[in-house]
Image (cartoon, rainbow, N blue to C red):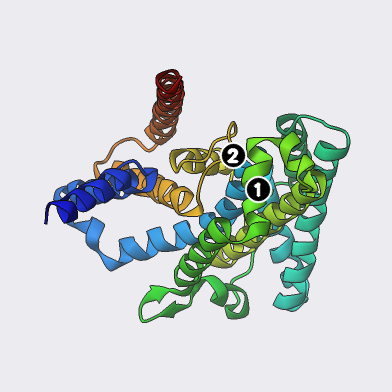
Amino acid sequence: MLNKNNSLISRFSQLIYHREFFLVVILVAMCFIIGNHNEGFWTMANFKGLARSFALDSVVLIGMTFLLISGMFDISVASVMALSSFSFALLFVNGLPVPIAALVTLAIGAMIGYINGFVITQFKVNPFITTLSMQTIVRGLVQALSQGKPIRAAAKAFTIYSTSEIFGIPTVFIVSVFILIGVDFLLRNIRYFRQLYFIGGNETSAELIGIDVKKTRIIFYIITAMLAALSGMLSASRLEGSTPTAYAGKEMILLVAAVIGGCSLNVGEGTMLGSALGLLFLFVLNNGLIMFRVDIFWFNFAVGFFLIVVVLINTFSSEAIANRQKKNIKLKL
């Protein structure tokens, strides 16, 4: 009996050290606090709004998580979303069927991702500089092509992909949950995806054990841009058109969500589940600020505050782990 109790205590102590566990606890607490303050939080209308928004952003978050685990990142995703939203709506309005318009838009996203990955890996340009430049180029291209004018596309064939429901639950949310679970499984169990952790942890060692680091990074930059393009198309479908100035700052929200969820640029760590919970945390936080009638412009302040807190926690915990390991080595000696 004592052994069983010790085993349960040991498992529980291991559980509380996981970032995902703390995020779940915080999310549950936040939901109860907001729900008790405002009953509108528990309404189906509020849930559907949160679910659709979460689903669209989680698509891009998958690619961002891949890159962060491998030691890279992409801040051009929001601009790619804007360009994809615009091109998808424009092609549809000009007579192309939705599948063809979607394929063309995905091809544009893939090309942007390839350029990002190629410049970073072949010319060894800093990923921040590369993707910042691409962000500016793509955003400028959208504004030049659209002349700042939105596109309206309210046809059912265009909007059905993001507005359909299954038993009252948005289809995009159901699909995104299954995709997130699948991606989390791949990162934990499949060797091809596990190599991202090796690349992020030590690029030189990854090359020495036979991983083609340059090729892998280019592939995942392409995947990330294509996912951003997909999210832009789904968003255009939901909003019945495209606005050239949309999605500004979205890349920072995604980066913060992934970092809150446990991703790190330094040691090649993170999980898809953690990133998804981090994104959900930000959505619930934003929803809570609205419910408490706090000025929405304070949301960016809150996001920045939580980012600093998480970075400090990561820094101190890493130092604590390193000091503990040094003490153990000294004791063994």
- The quadrant holding residue 100 is bottom right
Q: Name the residue under label 1.
A: 196
Farthest-out residue, left: 1
Q: How crowded is mark 2: few (under 14 residues within 10 Å), some or many (20 or more)?
A: many
Q: How many labels does the image show?
A: 2
Distance (Cα) linking label 1 and label 2: 7 Å
Residue 283 vs residue 151, the one in the foreground: 283
- The quadrant holding residue 127 is top right
Residue 74 vs residue 124, the one in the foreground: 124
Question: Residue 12 vs residue 102: left or right?
Answer: left
Looking at the rendered structure, the kind of residue marked 2 is Gly
Image location of residue 298, percent across then percent down: 38, 32
Image location of residue 129, percent across then percent down: 75, 29
Question: Residue 102 vs residue 169: left or right?
Answer: right
- For marks 1 and 2, the one nearer the N-term is 1
Figure quadrant of the N terminus: bottom left
Q: Is residue 75 visible?
A: no
In contact (CB < 8 Å): disc 1 and disc 2: yes
Farthest-out residue, front: 333
Question: Residue 332 vs residue 219: left or right?
Answer: left
Image location of residue 71, percent across then percent down: 65, 37
Q: For mark 1, give the secondary structure.
A: helix
Q: For mark 2, give the secondary structure.
A: loop
Q: Is residue 162 above or below residue 310?
A: below
Q: Can residue 125 be seen in this view?
A: yes
Q: Name the residue under label 2.
A: 268
Question: Residue 257 vs residue 232: left or right?
Answer: left
